[in-house]
Image (cartoon, rainbow, N blue to C red):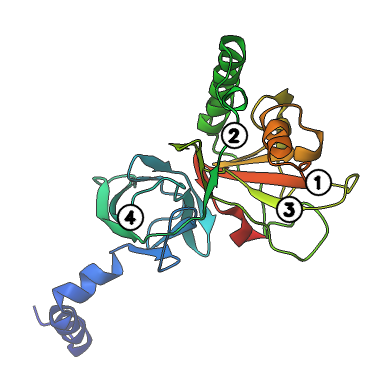
Amino acid sequence: MTRSPLALAVVLACLLIPPSAALAVDRPTVSWHPAKLRPGDVAWVLVQGVADGAPIEGSLGARSLLFFPYAGGQAAVVGIDLETKPGPHAWQLAILEPGREPRRLSGKLTVSRRDFQVQRLTLPTAMVDLDPETERRAVSEGERLRTLYRTITPERLWRGRWVRPVAGHEPGSGFGSRRVINGQPRAPHTGIDFSAPRGTPVVAANSGRVALLGDYFFPGRLVALDGRAQADLLTRRATEVKGRQDVLGRSAGARVPAHLGLALFFHGALVRQVDHL
């Protein structure tokens, strides 16, 4: 049997395609953004070149990645926690496509150092060391907040650009500042403060559902919004606080200035939300 010249040309063309080119068509691409990361930043990863709707599982260090459709592929957002140590951090992905073995990809993401302000204060012991009853309250409330931050659901409610919670143009301050009280290191400042006159309207920085509303010892009166798919927004009104922040303000010889504190968590990671306002 003889073959037509067209058939022979097609066979020859297939033989001339380099194996690497054939594999490249089937190889997923993974890109991380931004290129330089520091503690408190938010990173996002884009995976392209996979079948539509194919589930992707992944992690960055101990934090899971939840993917959603984006830009012809799938993307996930992850927070680089305030306490993350500088250096390389491993990431892993598994692409689950019907009819084939899971495709696994891995690599490392480098986190650079970020320097934070250090505040040194000297206060009366009674204003620093909690009595047993107050300490039990603070521990219980802290665990309730941590449970909220650990609760992850796949639905994503936040959309688009994050907005400033109060009117104004001055940048927020205080994120990550370290406090040393009476020579003892204390927890870093977990949010960013926006100065505003008392009575200023406050808006949500993005869409979400109210997950918690209460008067807590450390954060004071707060509203927690659950943006789902890793985002939790904690708004604190320091002008109405009755507790620790009030005490620290008076001990310095002045009333706490009117301001609003805002904290943003991505999958339990405390991040520098000012970058998204």
N-term mark: 3 or 2: 2
SS at mark 1?
A: loop
N-term mark: 4 or 1: 4
Q: Which amino acid, mark 2?
A: Leu
Which residue has dot 2 on it?
Answer: 123
Please indicate, yes or no, whether residue 157 appears anywhere in the rendered image. Answer: no
Q: Quarter-wise, where is residue 231 in the image? A: top right
N-term mark: 4 or 3: 4
Which residue has dot 3 on it?
Answer: 194
Foreground: disc 2 or disc 1: 2
Q: Which mark is residue 86?
A: 4
Which residue has dot 1 on it?
Answer: 258
Residue neighbourhood size for the residue with mark 4, other residues' Cα within 10 Å, grouped as few (<14), some (14–19), many (≥20): some
Q: Position of residue 199 (x, y in %)?
A: 91, 44
N-term mark: 2 or 1: 2
Q: Position of residue 208 (x, y in %)?
A: 70, 41
Between the C-alphas of marks 4 and 1, the distance is 35 Å
Residue at left offset 76%, top offset 27%: 242
- Furthest toward the top, the residue is 133
Residue 272 relative to residue 202: left or right = left
